[in-house]
Image: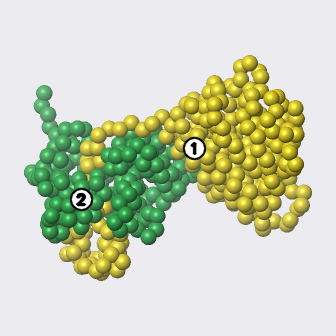
Chain colours: A green, B yellow
Amino acid sequence: MTRADPPLRLRTSSPADEADRAVLARLADGELDALEDLYDRYKTMAYSIAYRITNDTTLAEDVVQEAFLGVWRNAARYVEGRGSVKTWLLSIVHHRAVDAVRRRRPTTELPDVELPPPDALTLPDVWAEVAVGLDAVTVQGALAVLSDVQREAIHLAYFGGLTQQEIADRTATPLGTVKSRMRLGLLAMRRNLEGGSS
Amino acid sequence: MSGPDAMPVLTHDEVVEMSGAFVLGALPPAEAVAVRRHLGTCQLDHTEIAELGSVLPVLAASAPVAVPPDGLKARIMAAATAEAATQTSAAATAEAATAVPTPAAPVVAVASAPTPSPIAPQRAARRTGRIGAAGWALRAAAVVAIVALGGWNLLLRNQLAAAQSYQQAVASVIDVAGQAGSLTAVLTADGGPGTGLAAISASGGMTLAMQDLAPTSGSTVYTAWVIGGDGVPADIGSFTVDGAGTASLSAGGLPTTSGIVLAVTREPEAGLSAPTGPVISKGKATAAG
């Protein structure tokens, strides 16, 4: 059997995305049942991310609850074309979780307000494309292109909730180097997902 | 770079340099805002930020799978429903404030108001469609009924403090109702005022929120009772009520069998072994589906 990986694993829409947008439209129209549907679809993903970041079951539950309530409250503000609902939800969960762990670290600078709007609402294109077919092989393949120091910087930022300066301090690395490791590491992952060489 | 409280003005190259940290959420708040501000005005190409952002789902997918607890869904749905009901009450109160005062204005269900505001929470209160199909729906419906009707009634009388007190009590009930294996009961008035909401945890801990009760005086109290399969009322606890008409009660050691009945009576004194006064409110405790 010939196996031909698609050269591009990034795209902008899928039938699942369409279904998600329909759910979000129901939410925006005030149908609470839609929140139940959305939760059923993404509860495991959301909780997994929240728990990975917080390493605390109670905190993870609070994060997931606030994330879904945030989607419910802001459903009407979702902008189609700026990313999938799944990715938007993911970004909110991540944002909430990072905020939660940073609040446990009193030395970390925190926003004055509770939370800014999710980036997908205010910043075009950040979530413009969504990875699909995220099977374990794809995920591991994309992560495998990272060097050890790139992986460390990216994980400390994404899962540890550390700022770039905190990463620099913890790893005894110049700030500029930390910035480069995060940017070049993500670019390498992107190229891997596109099917090109890294 | 400026201090954390300052809002730095960034160049295109600076934004490119920090693009990875930006999409990973690793910038201090002031710098993140500065990046957003730059992206909103910069005429140069910043598509790389989109490319970097597209990788984040892969990072997320690398998180080990963790299964959320069973009660989380009910907790979320109850919280959303309570919030929608609260907003509904606030909107209804605002409408009432603009209407001609009518001292004998009837207390009506918000959901059946003839000219509902088109805001989403009101629609939410009407469209909790699958009631009975899922465990949260029963709890959510209970919260809608109690918070919306109670909030409406209280707010119409400008008893904001009472409304807030009652909502706090309801929030405590919701916390218990969201736990796995809990029971929920809606206590409806038995011929007079006085409604409430109660939740019993899997370990037998009960939280009760009541509103619209007539004030007590002297040694008079309200007593909560649980009636199990043997049909014999057992004293849960007693409480007094002031002019606000609201009350909350917490107790432990209750049976956790679905179908038990909770009742509130008005008694001449606390500590009676059996109810002697009239039943004010009662409801059956049922489990989530």
Lower position in the chain sequence, tag 2 or tag 1:
2
Q: Which residue is mark 2?
A: B52
Q: Which residue is located at x 26 percent, y 49 percent?
A: B59
Q: How far apart are the alpha carbons under marks 2 and 1?
A: 39 Å
Foreground pick, B62 / A56: A56
Q: Which residue is mark 1?
A: B175
Q: Which residue is located at x 31 percent, y 72 percent?
A: B31
Q: For residue B164, what is the image quadrant? A: bottom right
Q: Which residue is located at x 28 percent, y 54 percent?
A: A160
Quadrant of the drawing holding the N terminus of chain B: bottom left
Query: Residue type at mark 1?
Result: Asp
Q: Quick one: SS at disc 1?
A: helix
Q: Residues within 10 Å of mark 1 (few under 14, many from 20)?
A: some
Query: Residue type at mark 2?
Result: Leu
Tag 2 and tag 1, C-beta contact below 8 Å: no
Quadrant of the drawing holding the C terminus of chain B: top right
- The relative height of residue A98 versus residue A35 in the rendered view (above or below) is below
Foreground pick, A88 / B143: B143
- The relative height of residue A10 versus residue B65 in the rendered view (above or below) is below
